[in-house]
Image (tube, rainbow, N blue to C red):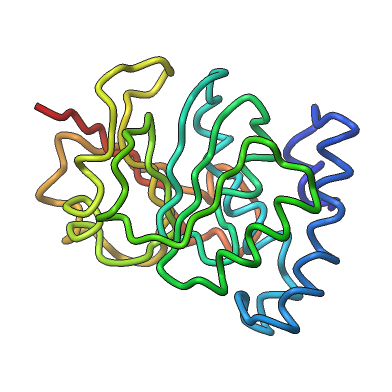
């Protein structure tokens, strides 16, 4: 937990309690349904929770904002963001049902009223959202083609509606076709830990015709 309060000093007592409980909840569920590697479960707060909250360092979602988390796995980045933004609505989806079971169990244990989790493919989603978030579930061009019809044109936040994509490594070639619509944030500018040295957050503005 200390790594969170190091960067986020204004957490409420309820948020601190919810974040504190994430460790034991994922420890428990990961022994039944493997959603986080054994190596990473020991670094849950740095590599999963804080990594997810990089989005909160770049944008403060306004109340009523709607977010779709595609390929959420065990609930990242959606669960940490839902704790951080209790007045924002999150829909977390994954094509693997057992992972969504973990998400639902964690959300229920934490009483996250702003989270809906569904075992569904993104192609089946009919609703439109202010932002689509994800942690590098596929190549960026493929992800854009999968989600571009899911974004609303009604902008209510300081960043235009679109994609918020957490990714590591070298992906210059992947984003070149979209360069005019993209802003890249280096996470090592936001967090001091070595893990974030090569990690980035891509914001891509999307408009539907």
Q: On the rendered image, what quadrant is the C terminus found in? A: top left
Q: Residue at x 14, y 35 (%)?
A: 180
Q: Nearer the viewer, residue 33 or 176?
A: 33
Report the number of discs: 0
169 horizontally vs 195: left or right: left
Q: Residue at x 76, y 46 (%)?
A: 4
Q: Position of residue 15 (x, y in %)?
A: 81, 37
Q: Quadrant of residue 196 in the image?
A: bottom right
Left/right of residue 60 with respect to residue 40 in the rendered view: left
Residue 147: give x, y in percent of width and height: 25, 48
- Which residue appears at 80% of the width and 74% of the height? 27
Q: In the rendering, at what x and y percent does residue 62 appear? A: 54, 19
Residue 199 coordinates in the image, percent (x, y): 46, 58
Residue 23 lies in quadrant: bottom right
State whether residue 101 is above or below residue 11: below
Measured along the vertical axis of the image, is residue 157 above or below residue 49?
above
């Amino acid at each position: 937990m200390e790594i969170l309060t190091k960067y986020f000093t204004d957490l409420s007592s309820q948020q601190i309690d919810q974040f504190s409980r994430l460790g034991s909840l994922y420890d428990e569920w990961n022994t039944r349904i493997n959603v986080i590697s054994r190596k990473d479960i020991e670094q849950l707060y740095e590599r999963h929770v804080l990594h997810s909250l990089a989005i909160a360092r770049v944008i403060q979602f306004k109340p009523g904002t709607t977010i779709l988390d595609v390929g959420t796995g065990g609930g990242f980045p959606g669960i940490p963001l839902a704790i951080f933004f209790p007045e924002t609505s999150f829909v977390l989806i994954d094509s693997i049902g057992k992972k969504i079971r973990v998400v639902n169990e964690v959300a229920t244990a934490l009483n996250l009223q702003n989270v809906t989790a569904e075992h569904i493919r993104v192609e089946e989603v009919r609703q439109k959202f202010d932002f689509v978030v994800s942690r590098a579930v596929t190549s960026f061009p493929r992800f854009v083609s999968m989600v571009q019809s899911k974004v609303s044109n009604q902008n209510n936040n300081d960043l235009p509606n679109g994609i918020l994509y957490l990714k590591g490594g070298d992906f210059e070639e992947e984003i070149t076709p979209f360069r005019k619509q993209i802003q890249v944030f280096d996470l090592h500018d936001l967090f001091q830990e070595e893990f974030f040295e090569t990690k980035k957050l891509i914001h891509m503005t999307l408009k539907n015709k």
